Amino acid sequence: MHEDAIAAFAPATVANVGAGFDILGFALHQPGDIVVARFNQVGTVRITQLTGNSSKLPREASLNTAGVAVIKLLEHLSIRQGIDLELHKRMPLGSGLGSSAASAVAAVVAANALLGSPLKKIDLLPFAMEGERVACGAAHADNAAPSLLGGFVLIRSYAPLDVVELNTPERLYAVVVHPHIEVKTQDARDILKKTLLLKDAIVQWGNIAGLVAGLMKSDYALIGRSLSDVIVEPVRAILIPGFSDVKAAALRAGALGCSISGSGPSVFALVCDARIAETVAQAMQDAFAEQGISSDRYISKINQEGAYVLPYSQYAAL
Ligand code: HSE
């Protein structure tokens, strides 16, 4: 890679975080995607290379989450310059780890840097969200915002977009277990009920407020009590064999709370000690194994940095 090419990394994320469907998410350190952007002479955006877990991804830029995000960014800036993108897919697809968001975020961060950084990081979010629209039909921001910004992020409003960065309690760890089954976000959204009961809404908004308060006050017990989703999780649990056993195992092993990561099938738990994180991860993996399902695990402090431009030395070493 030379000066005319810029690489960026964007991390995996856990969206929803229990009760916060489409409005809450946080970033992990790994896995994540890398996108390399360079100018071309053809005046359009092209996906010139796909590596890693990319066999099912469209090469056509207008259909690819990374490609669309950069097309929308260039349109916004009224720039006719073409850009080639290499997408190095280092995370599983359909995993509930925000794979499509990571690609879109890495792409806009790389392209923006290549263009001389005309936009601030936060202002790249709407373009990354367009990537989500092609990926699953909804321009939700609860993966893209934390992947871009790091930390816990609240989407207070979509129209207008109002993104609030929250506090991360010092001792918090995330455990994410990815069972080797695939759930498409669009399918996991299509099965959701379109209306809900007021009594369920009351429980849900109590938990969202409780979780945000728990994060701001570093109150681990409150975070644990608030990690409960009575609206989306009960419906989506049917897509994840053994989900209730996995959750029970995580709680027995000392997790503060446990729920589905994004649209699943990954399941996450929050814990407040590195040693307990190992025990919780093992218990969750064992519970999936009981169902005959193998899995990967990621244990991570909450990533506070989000996406970043990779120096050449780091990129070359990867
Ligand atoms: N909030 C989105 C959903 C996240 O649950 O469908 C998808 O990863």
Image (cartoon, rainbow, N blue to C red):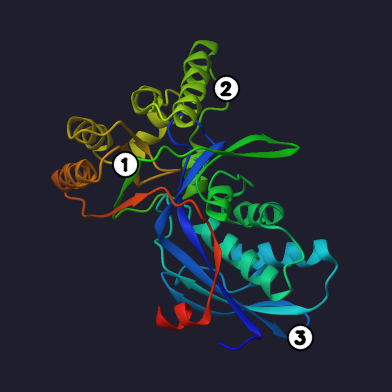
Residue 37: quadrant of the picture: bottom right
Q: Which amino acid type is marked by label 1?
A: Ile
Is 4 or 77 nearer to us in this picture? 4
Disc 2, SS? loop
Q: Position of residue 4 (x, y in %)?
A: 66, 85
Q: Position of residue 305 (x, y in %)?
A: 51, 55
First-in-chain label (3 vs 1): 3
Image position of 11 (left or right of 85):
left
The label on residue 240 is 1
Q: Residues within 10 Å of mark 3 (few under 14, many from 20)?
A: few
The label on residue 42 is 3
Residue that lies at the very extreme toward the top in this rendered image: 199
Q: Is residue 220 above or below residue 161?
A: above
Q: Does the CB distance between marks 1 and 2 fall below 8 Å?
A: no
- Disc 2 to disc 3, C-alpha distance: 48 Å
Image position of 197 (left or right of 91):
right
First-in-chain label (2 vs 3): 3
Q: Position of residue 44 (x, y in %)?
A: 75, 78
The image quadrant where one finds the N terminus is bottom right
- State the residue position of label 2: 195
- Disc 1 to disc 2, C-alpha distance: 23 Å
